[in-house]
Image (cartoon, helix red, strand yellow):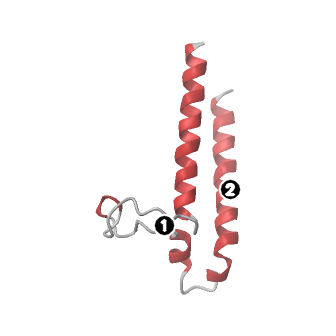
């Protein structure tokens, strides 16, 4: 019983972390939680979020940023679901 509860708590925590990462990568991030020089001093992780848009800026794929983000999120979540199903067998 204890292992089942801990497994569920770990699963919910993993889902929350993954959701926060996907939210940060999207254009909908609005929180300034760390200084302008970036998270942990990494300039590649600015507080404004929207990394997908900044990665695609200047490329022919820039107008499709939201579609590419959605497809990437779907593929990532599908891979995580497959991994979890393999682990729980």
Whole-percent x, y for residue 27 in the image: 57, 69
Query: In screen coordinates, is 24 left or right of 88?
Result: left
Whole-percent x, y for residue 19 in the image: 58, 50
Mark toward the start of the polypeptide (2 vs 1): 1
| Residue at image coords 57%, 57% | 22
User: Helix, strand or loop at disc 1?
Assistant: loop
Q: Residues within 10 Å of mark 2 (few under 14, many from 20)?
A: few
Q: Residues within 10 Å of mark 1 (few under 14, many from 20)?
A: many
Decide which of 24, 60 is in the foreground and name it. 24
Residue occupied by mark 1: 49
| Residue at image coords 64%, 40% | 83
Query: In screen coordinates, is 86 left or right of 25?
Result: right
Q: How many marks?
A: 2
Q: Nearer the viewer, mark 2 or mark 1?
A: 1
Decide which of 71, 48 is in the foreground and name it. 48
Which residue extends farthest top? 1
Decide which of 45, 89 is in the foreground and name it. 45
Residue occupied by mark 2: 75
The quarter of the displayed image where residue 69 is located: bottom right
| Residue at image coords 66%, 28% | 88
Vertical placement of residue 89 versus 78, above or below: above
User: Helix, strand or loop at disc 2?
Assistant: helix
The quarter of the displayed image where residue 39 is located: bottom left
Q: Disc number at residue 23?
A: none
Give the CA separation, mark 2 to mark 1: 20 Å
In the rendered image, the quadrant that contains the C terminus is top right
């Amino acid at each position: 019983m204890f292992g089942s509860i801990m497994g569920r708590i770990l699963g919910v925590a993993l889902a929350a972390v993954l959701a926060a990462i996907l939210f940060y990568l999207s254009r909908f991030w609005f929180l300034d939680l760390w200084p302008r020089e970036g998270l942990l001093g990494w300039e590649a992780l600015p507080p404004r979020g929207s990394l997908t848009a900044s990665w695609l800026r200047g490329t022919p794929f820039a107008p499709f940023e939201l579609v590419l983000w959605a497809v990437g999120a779907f593929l990532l979540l599908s891979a995580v679901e497959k991994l979890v199903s393999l682990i729980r067998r």
